[in-house]
Image: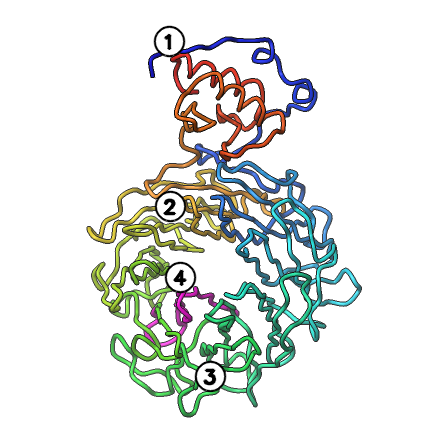
Amino acid sequence: MNNSTLFVRRSPIHLLCVAALCAAAPAALAQWSADPGNNLAIGDLANDQVQAKIKPTSDGGCYITWFDNATGGYDVKIQRLDRQGFEQFPHNGILLADRSYSSTVDYDMVVDASDNAIVTFRDNRSGTSLVTVTKVTPSGDQPWGASGVQPPGTTNANNPHVAVLSDGSIASGYSVGSGFTLVRLDPTDGHVVAGPVAISESGRTVTLSDLQPGDNGSVIALWVRPFTTSFLSSKYLYTQKYDSSLTALWTPPVGYAAVPVYAPQPSTPWPTGSGTYGTQGGSIQNGYFPTFVSDGAGGGVFGWYENAGPRNAYIQHILADGTAKFQANGLPNAVTDSTRIRISGTVAYDRATGEYYSASAESANPTQGNYSAFVQHFTAAGQRTFTDSGLTILPTGTGNQPSFVQVQAIAGGCVVTGIDSRSATTGVVFAAGVDSESASVTWSSLASSTIETKSRLTSCNSTSGDVFMAFSGGATGSQNMYAQNVSPTGVYGNPPPMCNPDVNQDGVADQGDVDYLINVIAGGENPTGIDADFNGDGVADQGDVDAIINVIAGGPCP
């Protein structure tokens, strides 16, 4: 561009706000923070803001849901952030349900192909504890009504889950009595199009753990199955895929009520170390309900840890036909002697390459202490590549204890996040990038460095490439809800604003671009889809007009 011949004329409209904008121009808004000591506050009312869920949207942003106890009852709230972390709903979120519970159970939130959030939770607004499923549009509307829909048979149900299926319909599941129920809902208004179907096993109390989409409108369910009639007995993990009519598709092995993900039988040898399981076989932890991820091809990828035998964490891939890709009861993410045990286990799957990642907190044994955190990489064939002990993220010997360890797959590696204690009641949030080829940690830092009570960290990949985190932090009894992004290279906050003044995309940076930007700021059409916040301060106003004029005239990027 030859600046000496560029025509730039500052007319009065370029120097003054459009009248309507001047009257309504807001102050600059909060966005993704570049300072880990000052994370983005999502909910900061009185009392606790807890139990976040975070899921990505197609525009590079996300939805965050949580329970707000500002007025008691653990009300359900939702917020949407854009790519830069700017809140799209009023600060402290939109109220979805004004509840009156004194404690919380798990709930679920997913995002459909049109960037609507589908949220399911326990709901006692009617005076009876039911399960509600509701849809929230990107503009914050609730097309199923303020009360959402209550699937049949949800009185006193718990632990609701939801999945958006490949045909656009919605699977809803919830534990009730000694089993759980599945229904399929129409995405337009939430009415039931299949089910309800009750899933149970004679002599057992089975509990829904997670739902994920399969192929051809199917849904995959994961549940916890106790060894005896007592829920305190050893607990296995079972799974099954159901078609659009909620008919089971997978044929279980002989002697099983569903496809076993984890079910070590009594008195069988441990997969690592020297020993045999007890009279009830292996078991996961009491009160532990693992999640899993869809493989995008009709199957599921599972990760969990056990509370018996060698105390390993595992991965398993159940393929679209219901067969297990790996050995029975899964592949351990570490092979160590009995002095170290795994006390958590999460999984990430790279659909593009077929590779797997599993991250865990680890402890000394038999007396727990001397904690660490590590991650393991598996090839598509299931081979461990980070040595048998994995790649250390947090070393032993610090006196701290990691929890809520998460892993997300990125191109060429993964990002591991978690909470690391600083005392019995305080902690920080850590993050680390890992390169799978070199088996090395490429960066490591604190994503939330303020030492205070931290809890319930959750994370997701974004469509923009960043990893998003949400967590509670603050004094006990008055925790706020926070969010933080981190790039694959370990950068927090937003990159510098894009500095292309050719906003009308005609190949020339000139007066036409200034006029185009003014028109978009004033509410006019935006066929090129630009972000009118040219200077990246969170507000589309006269400052953006001045900034683009300066850049066109040869000045620096804002």
Residue type of the residue flagged with mark 2: Ala
State the separation of the CA atoms marked 3 and 1. Answer: 75 Å
The answer to whether marks 3 and 4 mark residues whose Cβ atoms lie closer than 8 Å is no
The span shown in magenta is: 287-312
State the separation of the CA atoms marked 4 and 1. Answer: 59 Å
> Mark 3 or 2 closer to N-term?
3
Q: Nearer the viewer, mark 3 or mark 2?
A: 3
For residue 366, which quarter of the picture?
Answer: bottom left
Residue 448 screen position, x and y as percent = 45, 40
The answer to whether marks 4 and 1 mark residues whose Cβ atoms lie closer than 8 Å is no
Residue underneath mark 3: 258
The answer to whether marks 3 and 1 mark residues whose Cβ atoms lie closer than 8 Å is no
- Quarter of the image with the N terminus is top left
Residue underneath mark 4: 346
Residue 253 screen position, x and y as percent = 40, 88
Seen in the picture, residue 42 relative to 215 is either above or below; the reply is: above
> Mark 4 or 1 closer to N-term?
1
The answer to whether marks 2 and 4 mark residues whose Cβ atoms lie closer than 8 Å is no
Residue 428 part of the magenta segment? no
Residue underneath mark 1: 5
Residue 238 screen position, x and y as percent = 46, 78
- Quarter of the image with the C terminus is top left
Disc 1 on helix, strand or loop? helix
Disc 4 on helix, strand or loop? strand
**Mark 3 residue crowding within 10 angstroms, few (<14) / some (14–19) / many (20+):** many
Q: Nearer the viewer, mark 3 or mark 1?
A: 1
Residue underneath mark 2: 431
